[in-house]
Amino acid sequence: MTRSLNNRLSLLSASALLLLATAPAQAVDGLAFVYGDGDGDDDVEMFRVAAQWDWDQRWFDNGGWYLTGYWELDAGYWDGNGGLNDSLSDIGFTPVFRFQSNASNGFQPYVEGGIGVHLLTDSKINNKDMSTEFQFGDHIGAGFRFGEKLEWDLGYRYQHFSNAGIDKPNPGINFHQIRLGYHFN
């Protein structure tokens, strides 16, 4: 990847973080920290910070469960096993649908899924060539919100990155992730 694109990604990432830091607290509904570990032979760890904007919509609210969602903007770092191309960074944007319990006891389980877009600083990590810096990231997950005001969110995600056949090779990469979030509401 060219130094120019690297510089633009760094500037874009710094701008996004500055925007998040200077935005009014009520503009961002939550923040999350994510740790991921590569699936199978992919010896890659992922560290990510995400901002969340809730949709404030409830569909199919039958009293017990409802469908809702949020926008997620994230910045991450992938750490490989120390060989050539052993690290990269990414920024991503994902709409996430969440089917969540409506329980009032301070504990609300959920299942969720999302498909978003990601821009990587390199198309290679370790010995894996993903062909393009542009990747789609889809995930499924489950977890629960808890706390006095349901301010905490702990979940598991299985996330897949792929360029969806835009270019070959397209091996994709998968991560098992743990996500800890905090909601400002």
Image: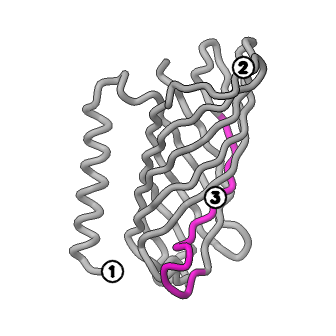
Give the mark nearest the N terminus, 1 or 2. Answer: 1
Q: Which mark is residue 43?
A: none
Q: Which of the two residues, 108 or 41, is positioned nearer the viewer here?
A: 108
- Whether residue 68 is situated above or below residue 139 in the rendered picture: above
The secondary structure type at the circle numbered 2 is loop
The secondary structure type at the circle numbered 1 is loop
Q: Residues within 10 Å of mark 2 (few under 14, many from 20)?
A: some
- Whether residue 104 is situated above or below residue 34 in the rendered picture: above
Asked if residue 168 lies in the magenta stretch, the reply is yes
Q: Are marks 2 and 3 in contact (CB under 8 Å)?
A: no
Give the mark nearest the N terminus, 2 or 3. Answer: 2
The secondary structure type at the circle numbered 3 is strand
Task: Name the side, left or right, on which 127 lies relative to 176.
Answer: left
Question: Where does label 2 land, which residue?
Answer: 102
Residue depicted at x 66% and y 35%? 154
Specify the quadrant of the image occupied by residue 138: bottom right
Name which residue type carries label 2: Asn
Magenta extent: 154-170
Q: Residue 118: x and y, percent?
A: 45, 61
Q: Are marks 3 and 1 in contact (CB under 8 Å)?
A: no
Q: Residue 6: x and y, percent?
A: 28, 70
Name which residue type carries label 3: Gln
Residue depicted at x 40% and y 64%? 119
Q: Residue 2: x and y, percent?
A: 27, 80
**What quarter of the picture does the N terminus occupy?**
bottom left
Give the mark nearest the N terminus, 3 or 1. Answer: 1
Name which residue type carries label 1: Met
Q: Which mark is residue 159?
A: 3
Residue depicted at x 72% and y 12%? 104
Question: Where does label 1 land, which residue?
Answer: 1
- Whether residue 171 is situated above or below residue 55 in the rendered picture: below
Q: Which of the two residues, 147 or 52, is positioned nearer the viewer here?
A: 52
